[in-house]
Amino acid sequence: MKAEVTIMLKAGVLDPQGKAIGQALHGLGFAGVGEVRQGKIIQLELAETDPAKAKAAAEDMARKLLANTVIESFKVEIKP
Amino acid sequence: MKAEVTIMLKAGVLDPQGKAIGQALHGLGFAGVGEVRQGKIIQLELAETDPAKAKAAAEDMARKLLANTVIESFKVEIKP
Amino acid sequence: MAQQVNQALAKQFGLSADEYGRVLAIMGRTPSFTELGVFSVMWSEHCSYKSSRVWLKTLPTKAPWVIHGPGENAGVVDIGDGLAAVFKMESHNHPSFIEPYSGAATGVGGILRDVFTMGARPVANLNALRFGDPKLAVTKRVVDGVVRGIGGYGNCVGVPTVGGEVNFHPAYNGNPLVNAMTVGIADRNKIFLSAAAGIGNPVVYVGSKTGRDGIHGATMASTSFEKDSEEKRPTVQIGDPFVEKLLIEACLELMATDAIIAIQDMGAAGLTSSSVEMAGKGDVGIELDLDHLPQRETEMTAYEMMLSESQERMLMVLRPDRQEMARAIFAKWDLDFAVIGQLTDTGHIVVKHKGVVEADIPLAPLADQAPLYHRPTSETPKPAALGAVADPVGLRTALLTLLACPDLASRAWIWDQYDSTIGGQTVKRPGAADAAIVRLDGHTRALALTTDCTPRYCQADPELGGMQAVVEAWRNITATGGKPLAITDNMNFANPEKPEIMGQFAAAIRGMAAACVALDFPVVSGNVSLYNETEGQPILPTPAIGGLGVLEDAAQAVGQAIAPGQTLVLIGETAGWLGQSLWLREIAGREDGPPPPIDLTAERRNGDFVRGQILSGAVRACHDVSDGGLLIAVAEMALAGNTGVALNLTGDHAFWFGEDQGRYVLAVDNAAATLVAATAAGVPAAIIGTAQGQGLTLPGIDPISLTEARAANDRFFPAWMN
Amino acid sequence: MKAGIVVFPGINRERDMAIALHASTGRAPAMLWHKDADLTGLDLVVIPGGFSYGDYLRCGAMAAQSPAMAAIRAHVARGGYLLGVCNGFQILTEAGLLPGALLRNAGLRFLSMDCHLRVERADTAFTNRYRAGEVFRAPMAHGDGNYFADDATLDRLEGENLVALRYATAEGAVTPDANFNGAARNIAGILSPSLRVMGLMPHPEDLVDPLMGGTDGKPLFDALAALEVA
Ligand SMILES: Nc1ncnc2c1ncn2[C@@H]1O[C@H](COP(=O)(O)OP(=O)(O)O)[C@@H](O)[C@H]1O
Ligand SMILES: [Mg+2]
């Protein structure tokens, strides 16, 4: 079973990466690009076969290690 | 309209970050974790309202800037 | 934010009942929410120095080479060749515990701004770090994040990190110390100050946009750190070193013109403290219109904008006829530039937002009537004398154990993550000499830079500890051949409302002042960080000293590395002082006794002699004797030069590991000449051995190979972190 | 020899590079801000180290897409020499002027230390003051210096003799231990097929003065001082 943890900076936390990417896209002539935010995605191969349990485990991993919950929020999706 | 560009290292490109996360998870006692890969996610606010056009634009951005196709592959999803 | 302003709210904002009473008296009415915010941050410990000011005033701050002492963004000293060194140290302790990477990174960013705001190009960063017990998982997380953060910011802005110090002690378990120092170089006649002038002149904001970052950071830095800090947690500030780099270049470019009348970085308490201080120092009024403030978020209130601690922002007063030229420079660097107000003759700060006056405060009483406390002090009892302590392990085991202990282990793991060579002027990199040596681009002159403090001495005897911190900085500069010029300090202490803590503070200042006077080594800038305690556990008193010295010719600097054939000469008196030594702690498992006494006259005489010998060209390598004592100093010189030493003295553990002060080990070619010169100067000197072979040999013990010593010394950090 | 240094925002080793070039060529190189970089008449263009655009997306990615790259490509097309060091190397790979990519260091930490480089090819305008097989020391300072290319590309680089420098021990052995950042086949620097473009990760420009610990990097700049665009 696969889990995908998406980690983004919390709203209101400065995202220098996103900001710089946005400016670069404008520089390349892409119009109509508003806010850009950059985050991390972590794909985990899990032995667990029960989707609910896999999700709970991945959430636990995110809280304990993958995300820095002081500044980041995360979301877990289970993919078969 | 929101576009989400997910960028992962290609298979065959060593992902030391993913590997380090995998080891750290084992160290924390999480069993049953197999391969771990880390990638990037870039969320774009787009003025474009047509989903197909928005997707094409985001793919263009990914090819030109957001991803380095020598080492990375990308995927674009449009979210309303 | 239609919150009722009253005493209860004032208390939440960190103002005492008495302080709120003063606010009411000054305003003659109930202040608005924004006004209360302004008072609370301006009168916070962090901005007002209300507990420490009476003591700071007693520090010596003058010397013929001091251009600007405390009171400006950073201290300024004349270093010859028409140049000035601008330097300061600042703490980011609490933020570095909450979010180690960002806390440390923004600490570096903040101190850089204090230096380039005065017109100096930053040429070196240093730091002074204290962490808790390495056995705790949280310590590892904090060390990892802090080191990455310092490197992440400093490497990106392109300022070499050339030195620092690191200690571990359980007293820092919940309250690490992250003190960052920046040194910059400016034209002596082109120093920029913050006093605003010229009624009607535009007030200009440059740099990053304002968000809701770190609101009430200054007040957070002024309270102790309890369990509920989870809830009090302000939005963590994230540093953007890329923007900082642009800001440095843009400001220096503008500073090459005559456009700037006054300039100040937005540090703690952001727009509030920068605008209040600039107007206050210039005795003018200031009016801000927040509608023009570059904002990163929507719907920000006046209160939020005034108190935001978003990073990488500066405030300037410009000549009106240079405004457009200045705007073009910031456009070139892709930075925000906005006229957000002007200077007035009202003597008030007036803040408008959406047509409403959100704050209108008279500046003079805001400054003059700021609280000032003569807090009660109680003296730290002098520690009982240490009786005889038997040697439980022998010299060989003790040496290898000490070389491997966290406080003495090689710091290469840390400095290997800091770019120390950028700029192409780093003559002595971290680990190469007692002070880092950075040449001045285009000159033969170099700076000698160091940070020092021995908190275990300060805990046992704060006066002696304060003195020792200054003396060690002086000694480290001296040991490279540098002439020590001035210091910056970072006074890290626990809760000043406790008499024993305030007593530590007062005593440390007394000791520092005595050393500064005796060594002609004045304080030109500094920072105070109080309330460093977590759940009643105070940190060790830690008056970290950043020292700056100068060498007229960078080529005269010496390092620690010895080479075969040289003779090692010990300068200074050795009594075998084990009280508060690392040997006592690491080998005997005791932290007691008085720290080693300091004889300031001997200190000065020995140091002046050593420097004279170095500058005469007689010295190949030099190292002061500090933590761990003589045998550790010799081992460090051997490891640096990859050359063994045959020691010819017989001594016990107290002789080899005692931490008597005022000592140096010199490596010379002609020891007889050194001894003659020492006798003439009235300085104790003795030959202790010869550099040769691949091991340390001393009478009565099995030789210790350099390989073995190096393995012990190199082990701790990589084994802990990898 | 006329040299110019292109400065993108966030580049920070341009002064070091200018000092080294000046010392060897006897004249100060032109410092060219990326927004108005005029490269006409230059023999050599250098992109120095630093953190262009903060290295916020990938190292060098944003600079590689910026307008100044058009002028740099034109300079190469007309036979000019181009040197990219550290971030400059990353920019050249991102721009496709050199093959491969620079990944995060294998140990995931920024590495600031001296390394040793073995000269694999001494018959180029960049390296002709070294001898083939000679080892020289250079500081490195990067978080992403782990050279990567697929096997076919690596084989081609080696087949065409386009590897300029490899990480080695002080004695010249190309070993995993000497390869601090984990680069594929210990590659520290590569050349374009025309031999007019070179990229490398370490910083020879920071070791051209005995006071800073040595002059190991100086032959590179002495070689550049002599080059001429045919
Ligand atoms: N412990 C100290 N010793 C000497 N000067 C100090 C000390 N603490 C603060 N200062 C001086 O007080 C002034 C205000 O310091 P600070 O509030 O830290 O400035 P800023 O917020 O601009 O960085 C500075 O000039 C600083 O050098
Ligand atoms: Mg300041």
Image (cartoon, coloured by chain):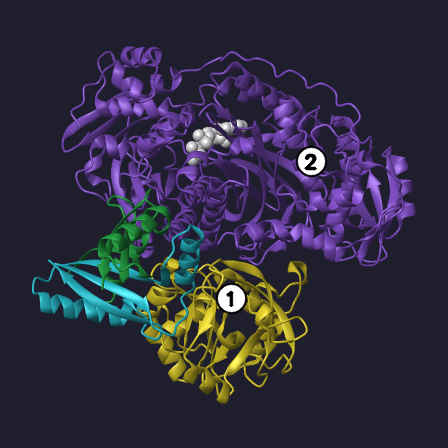
Chain colours: A green, B cyan, C purple, D yellow
Residue A37 to residue C229: above or below: below
The residue depicted at 33 percent of the width and 65 percent of the height is D62
- Please state if C216 lies on the left or on the right of C690 as rendered: left
Image quadrant occupied by the N terminus of chain C: top left
Q: Secondary structure at mark 1?
A: loop
Q: Position of residue C450 (x, y in %)?
A: 62, 42
Q: Quadrant of ligand 2?
A: top left
Q: Quadrant of residue C343?
A: top left
The residue depicted at 27 percent of the width and 59 percent of the height is A4
Q: CA distance from mark 1 to mark 2?
A: 36 Å
- Please state if C402 lies on the left or on the right of D16 as rendered: right
Check the image and name the residue furthest to the front.
A49
Residue labelled with disc 2: C582
Q: Position of residue D84 (x, y in %)?
A: 46, 72
The number of numbered badges drawn on the structure is 2
- Please state if C480 lies on the left or on the right of B68 as rendered: right
Q: Nearer the viewer, residue C650 or C450?
A: C650
Q: Position of residue D61 (x, y in %)?
A: 35, 67
Q: Position of residue C62 (x, y in %)?
A: 60, 27
Res. D222 visible in picture:
no
Residues flagged by tags 1 and 2 on a common chain: no
Amino acid bearing label 1: Asn
Residue labelled with disc 1: D181
